[in-house]
Amino acid sequence: MLELGLKSAINRVTAAIVIAVVVSGCSQVSAWLSPGSGSDSGAPEGPAISAAPTAEDYVLELAVLSSGDPALQAEIFANSEVAAQLAPNPSTMLRFALVLATPGHPESDPRQAQSLLRELMNQQALMTPAEVGLATIYLDSTEELIRLSSQARQARVTSDRAQRTEEVAFNQRLATVEAENRRLQQDLEEAESKLEAITSIEQSIRQQDQ
């Protein structure tokens, strides 16, 4: 029951990621990218920021990644990984981190995503407000997923340990019962042997009397 509850919680967090990205990406994040919002953020203008993808770019790709199409998932992961390796900058690294942080595809890796996102949070001056917002959302959600996964593993270990302990206790009880059955069987055989001896003696005495 505990493991089912943890799985349900993980599913709720996964759904929260998608909702947070869609809501924040399509409304608040879009507002972050509006011309007036950049001047209030305090983030310096520069090549890394001006060339950064829009929030919609990230959100649309993550939506496709969550569609469940294995071919598209593999293509998106490969493209994001190659881009991060060949042209490492906050935007390509964020894209790769978001792909790794998104559950539901074979290459999902929350721990690697957590590491990349933490590094990116130290480079906020090179990121747009939208990128900072997405990184923050995904870092929080990824850390929650890691925590829940750790709890699930611990629950499985505890359950397995309890099951092994119960099996050992059962085997011990079974061995005790079998040993007691063997002792009773031996006592019965000895009693039958004594009874046969007594019966034989009685028959011999009767024959002598006759």
Image (cartoon, rainbow, N blue to C red):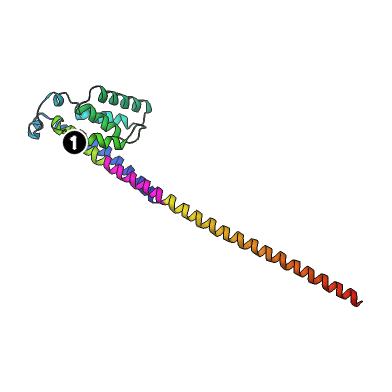
Based on the displayed image, in which of its 4 quarters is residue 119 positioned? Answer: top left
How many numbered circles are shown?
1
Secondary structure state at the residue bearing disc 1: helix
Q: Position of residue 159 (x, y in %)?
A: 42, 51
> Residue placed farthest to the right in the image?
210
- In this rendering, the answer to whether 13 lies above or below 164 is above
Residue nearer the viewer, 174 or 186: 186
Q: Position of residue 163 (x, y in %)?
A: 46, 52
Q: Position of residue 205 (x, y in %)?
A: 86, 75
Residue nearer the viewer, 83 or 13: 83
Magenta residues, start to end: 142-158
Residue nearer the viewer, 200 or 118: 200
Question: Residue drawn at (74%, 67%), measured in percent from left and top?
Answer: 192
Question: Residue drawn at (20%, 38%), measured in percent from left and top?
Answer: 136
Left or right? Give the position of 182 relative to 85.
Answer: right
- In this rendering, the answer to whether 14 lies above or below 158 is above
The residue singled out by tag 1 in the image is 121
Magenta-colored segment: predominant secondary structure: helix
Question: What amino acid is labelled 1 in the image?
Answer: Met
In the picture, which quadrant includes the C terminus? bottom right
- Check if residue 61 falls in the magenta segment: no
How many residues crowd around disc 1 within 10 Å: few (fewer than 14), some, or many (20 or more)? some
> Residue placed farthest to the bottom in the image?
209
- In this rendering, the answer to whether 146 lies above or below 199 is above
Whether residue 31 can be seen here: no
Whether residue 182 can be seen here: yes
Based on the displayed image, in which of its 4 quarters is residue 206 positioned? Answer: bottom right
Question: Residue drawn at (38%, 49%), measured in percent from left and top?
Answer: 155
